[in-house]
Image (spheres, rainbow, N blue to C red):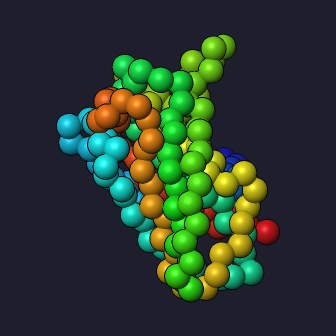
Amino acid sequence: MKGFSVKFFQMSVMVVLFLTSCQTIPLYEQTTIFPEHSWSAKQVNAYQFNITDTSASYKVYFVIRHHNAYHYKNIWLQVAVQTPTGSLSKQNVNLNMADESKGWLGTGMDDLFDQRIPLISLPSHFQKGITTFYLQHTMREDPLQNILSSGIRVEKVKP
C-alpha cells in the first residue's frame, strides 16, 4: 500500500510538470476597472511593461470583462504602441467578441464574460526597455455600456 502511494505521488508530480511545461509564461497583465460599467470614448488607458529578454517572442492580448447585456458582437479599438526609443504607431482594430453559432467567445459565469483576444496575430519581438500600449475604444456608443474592465496581457512564448 505504501509503494502505491509513492508511485501515485510521483505520477501526479510528473503529470503536473508535463501539463505546465507546454504553456506560455505570463509576463504582464493590467486592467482598468470601470466602476459605472461604462467606458468613455475620451478615456485612453495606458499600460506599460518592461522588456528585458529581446530574444524571446511575445503574444499580446486585449482582455475585457463585460456583461451579457453588451450590445455588440465586436469592439473597435484604437491601439497605440510607444517603443522604448519613443516612436509611436497607431492602428484601429476590430475585435470579434461573439459569433452566431457559439455566442460569446470568452468564458462566462452567470451574466459576466471574460475574453482574451489577440491584438497581434503572430508572436512579436520587442525592444529592450519600457513599451507602452494605449487603448481607446472607437465605438459609436459613448460611453460604451456594460464594460466592467479592459486591459492588456503580454505573454512570453516558451521556446
Asked whether residue 102 appears in the rendered view, the answer is yes
Q: Position of residue 65 (x, y in %)?
A: 40, 38
The vertical placement of 50 against 47, above or below, is below
Quadrant of the rendered structure where residue 96 is?
top right
Using residue 114 as the reference point, say whether residue 7 is left or right of it: right
Question: Which one is nearer the viewer's eye here, 157 or 62?
Answer: 62
* Residue 100 in picture, x, y percent from top left: 63, 14
48 and 113: which is toward the camera: 48
**Residue drawn at (47%, 23%), measured in percent from left and top?**
72
- Count every numbered label the image shows and give the total: 0
Residue 158 is drawn in which quadrant? bottom right
Q: Quadrant of residue 16?
A: bottom right
Furthest toward the right, the residue is 159
The answer to whether residue 18 of the structure is visible from this angle is no
- Residue at 55% of width from left, 44% of height from top? 116
For the C terminus, the quadrant is bottom right
The residue located at (67%, 66%) in the rendering is 58
> Which residue is depicted at the point 56% across and 86% down?
85
Q: Where is residue 125 in the image (x, y as percent from the top left)?
A: 71, 72
Q: Residue 90: x, y in percent?
A: 56, 60
Left or right position of 51 against 126: left
Question: Which sits in the foreground, 152 or 25?
Answer: 152
Residue 13 higher or lower than 40, as above or below: below
Q: Is residue 71 above or below residue 134?
A: above
Which of the two residues, 112 or 133, is positioned nearer the viewer here? 133
Q: Looking at this rendering, what residue extends furthest in the top direction?
A: 101
